Amino acid sequence: MIFQKNSAEIERIRASCHVVFQVQQAIAQQVRPGVTTRLLDELAERVIRTCGGVPAFKGYRGFPASICASVNSAAVHGFPGDRPLRRGDILSVDVGVALQGFYGDGAFTMGVGPIKPDRARLLATTRACLEAGISQARAGGRLSNISHAIQACAEAAGFCVIREFGGHGIGRELHEDPHIANFGRPGLGPRLRPGYVLAIEPIIGLGEPEIEVAKDGWTALTRDRSPVAHFEHTVAVTTDGPDILTLPAGCAEAASCA
């Protein structure tokens, strides 16, 4: 069942998303060669709790950390650890926050220092896939229009969709209906209604799309160890079009607005 949120509920989700944004900014400022993802995780938890929130991922189905920190070929659900980031890595950070009974969720990928051109193009394309998906989060449209827009954008640029994972509804729970695949034909699924709040998150790979799960039981890695990028926004469907809750007014993109 897809829940429609009223304006007051959407504003409470927005408040959670504002904390997500603050965490993303704090992390982005610290990403550099030599920094460990464990230190970034500790920073994230401090920011979340200082803002009055709770890390939504920590303890979720046994996940041990406040962020997912996925490096290079880790598609999603990477454990923060003590391996220092290296020049040329790409790091995907996924952040979830619970604040006063409502959830926000967002992700971004960035390079650790200068990165190779193919990786830079992967990041730019995945960001474009997110924008394409968000553009279809409109009242009256079909859910799969979001999925198709993401897939078309990725494949037109020569990249693949990691199909095992996708977006989701969000609100009083971290994961609500509907599941939002990052691929599929347009014109299918439920019609979108004002008040739906969706976490849209393309996960796009440079090589082959097949994945395997690491021994930790969480980290999803591409089998060919090709790099993956991941961007995510929490978006409200409104009568005036999509409202990106994980961005403050006037900010074009998370992790790029000071």
Image: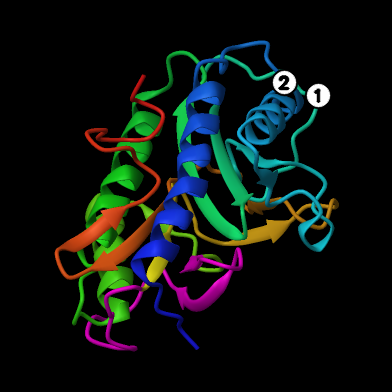
Q: Is residue 185 magenta?
A: yes
Stretch in magenta: 166-195
Dot 1 surroundings within 10 Å: few (below 14), some, or many (20 or more)?
A: few
| SS label for mark 1 | loop
Q: Which residue is mark 2?
A: 36
At horizontal 30% and vertical 62% (from top left) the residue drawn is 150
Tell me, for residue 93, which label it has, or none. none
Q: Is residue 18 visible?
A: yes
Q: Position of residue 204 (x, y in %)?
A: 43, 52
Give the left or right position of residue 176, taking residue 255 as reference: right
| SS label for mark 2 | loop
Quarter where residue 213 is shown: bottom right
At horizontal 77% and vertical 48% (from top left) the residue drawn is 58
Q: Which residue is mark 1?
A: 82
Give the left or right position of residue 95, taking residue 38 as reference: left
Q: Position of residue 181 (x, y in %)?
A: 43, 72
Q: First in sequence: mark 1 or mark 2?
A: 2
Magenta stretch: helix, strand or loop mostly: loop
The colour scheme used to paint the residues is: rainbow
Tell me if label 1 and label 2 are in contact, CB under 8 Å: yes
> In the rendered image, which quarter contains the C terminus?
top left
Q: Nearer the viewer, residue 173 or 15?
A: 15
Q: Nearer the viewer, residue 255 or 2?
A: 2
Q: Is residue 224 visible?
A: no
